[in-house]
Amino acid sequence: MFLTNTLKLPIGNVVMFSNFGPEEFYVIEATTPLKEYSNHIEVLWRYRLLPKLTSSKKYEFIALDTDVDLSKYLGSMSDEFVMGDSWRVKDIEFGVSVFDSNDNDLQLSFLNGLPGYANLIADYFTEYQFVVAGVPFIDNDSDDMFDAIDFYLGEY
C-alpha cells in the first residue's frame, strides 16, 4: 500500500478529488483476491483506491478523474456490493467501481462520468473505496470486467 495523489496506469492517469480539491489516496495492489475467486480471467492490473479523509472536514463528494479516453463506453455493472462502469481503450477494457452496501447510507453519484460518492458521512469513511482495473478486451458481452471491479471478501 502506498499514498499518492496520482495513479499512473499504462493507459493514463487517475486522480481523486473532493469539494476541497485534489485528495491523496491509498493504493492497494489487488489482483490476488480476484485470482482467488476468479482465476479464469487475465487481469492486467487491479487496484483498490482508498481516500485519505479527514474527520474535521465535511465532504460534499469524493470522486475520481482521469485522462484516459472514455469515449467508447461499454456499460454499467452492479450488484449488492458494487456499482461500476467500463470502457474500451484500444485493446483494453478499463473499469472503475465504487463499493456499495445495503447496510449503510452511502450515497452514490457520478461525476465526470465516473462513479463516486456524495454527502459523505464520517462514520463510514472506511467504506468509501474504489476499484480500477484493466483486462484484455474480448468482446462487448464479456463478464471479465465485472469480476475485475467487484469487491471480494476482506476488501469491504
Image: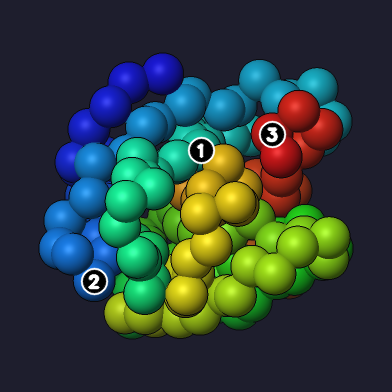
Residue at 60 percent across and 52 percent down: it is: 124
- Whether residue 84 is visible to the viewer of this picture, yes or no, is yes
Say which label, 3 or 1, has the lower sequence index: 1
Instruction: Give above or below for 41 relative to 148.
Output: above
Residue 63: horizontal and vertical position, in percent?
A: 36, 65
Q: Mark 2 Cα within 10 Å, few/some/many (few <14, many 20+)?
A: few
Residue labelled with disc 1: 48
Snapshot colouring = rainbow
The amino acid pointed to by label 1 is Arg
Q: Find residue 153 and report its image quarter.
A: top right
Residue labelled with disc 3: 155
Q: Which mark is residue 19?
A: 2
Q: Nearer the viewer, mark 2 or mark 1?
A: 2
Q: Nearer the viewer, mark 2 or mark 3?
A: 2
Residue 20: horizontal and vertical position, in percent?
A: 18, 64
Say which quadrant the N terminus sits in: top left
Residue at 57 percent across and 42 percent down: it is: 126
Say which label, 2 or 3, has the lower sequence index: 2
Say which label, 2 or 1, has the lower sequence index: 2
Q: Residue furthest front?
A: 56
Instruction: Give above or below for 10 relative to 74.
Output: above
Q: Which mark is residue 7?
A: none
The amino acid pointed to by label 3 is Glu
Instruction: Give above or below for 102 relative to 34.
Output: below
Residue 108: horizontal and vertical position, in percent?
A: 57, 75
Instruction: Give above or below for 41 relative to 75.
Output: above
| Cα separation between marks 2 and 3 | 26 Å
